[in-house]
Amino acid sequence: MDVRVSCSLPMYDLPELEADTRALWSGIAARLRQAGIAAPDELLRPADPRSHWLDPDLLLSQSCGYPLLSLPARVRVVATPAYRAEGCDGGWYRSALIVRHEHPAMRLADLRGGVCALNDRDSNSGMNLLRAAIAPLAAGQRFFRACRETGSHVASIAAIAAGRADLAAIDCVTLALLQRYQPACLSGTRLLGWTASSPGLPFVSAGDDATIDALRGALAEVGADPALRPVRDRLLIDGFVILPEGAYQRIADLERQAILSGYPELA
């Protein structure tokens, strides 16, 4: 079969979980084929996720909720994984506010004038949720002495541990996975608090209505298959939910509130 569609599950694919991510995809792909949808055997590992999400042949991927706001309407939300992690509630999640273990800060306001580490300015968990938390404290002024882009949540945590930064907002699913599979990288850090919540990282597709229905059916079966329970447990996935239409507007609302308060950029 000549399969031209593209698929990836790039968001929480730690090296320790590569086999489980492949097993999850195999379960999804098998059910799609039963529904008459061509599905590749292997997942892509796109170097440029945004270009991948814009592929008109995108069958399935997982995107961050913040860049989702600027993707064209043809990129549609299929479902949202419900993760079993502190900070999650169904298909919603928060970011954990992380500081050095010995940092004297007791609340977010104590970080004024410090250095912020953020994984990416196009990140909901690392930037948008943190900006929303800082905006009421900033009162339209610069809050941090500097904001340094690190390229990943793991790198942000490393910057905190090494004393190169004072604060980072870490996706709570990433934090829970690191606590389980890479606990050493969290050494020297502590939890200061939590951001507001927003819808979690959605599974998206450029497929038509029939394809979206087939994907949702496949995800529902995979989320309930007893044979895949060990895989779901290792990935911290409880299942897949279809959030109400407009749920992801919450992310845009948080952005707008920060802008209206005079804090359009995390700084």
Image (spheres, helix red, strand yellow):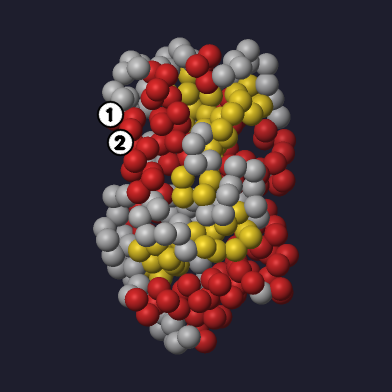
Q: Nearer the viewer, residue 19 or 102?
A: 102
- Report if residue 40 is visible in the image: no
> What x and y, as percent, mark residue 102?
68, 16
Circle number at residue 260: 1
Look at the image and tell me in which quarter the N terminus lies: bottom left
Q: Nearer the viewer, residue 190 or 188?
A: 190
> What x and y, as percent, mark residue 230?
73, 65
Circle number at residue 256: 2
Which amino acid type is marked by label 1? Leu
Q: Dividing the picture into quarters, in which one does residue 266 lie?
A: top left
Please tell me which residue is depicted at 42% across the width and 59% down the height of the picture: 244
Element on which disc 2 rests: helix
* Residue 248 left/right relative to 31: left
> What x and y, as percent, mark residue 110?
53, 14
Circle number at residue 155: none
Q: Nearer the viewer, residue 197 or 96?
A: 197
Q: Dividing the picture into quarters, in which one does residue 140 lie?
A: top left
Decide: is 164 above or below 85.
above
Please tell me which residue is depicted at 49% across the width and 59% down the height of the picture: 80
Which amino acid type is marked by label 2? Arg
Question: Mark 1 near mark 2, Cβ–Cβ under 8 Å?
Answer: yes
Please tell me which residue is depicted at 71% across the width and 74% down the height of the picture: 227
Element on which disc 1 rests: helix
Please tell me which residue is depicted at 48% across the width and 85% down the height of the picture: 35
* Residue 95 left/right relative to 251: right
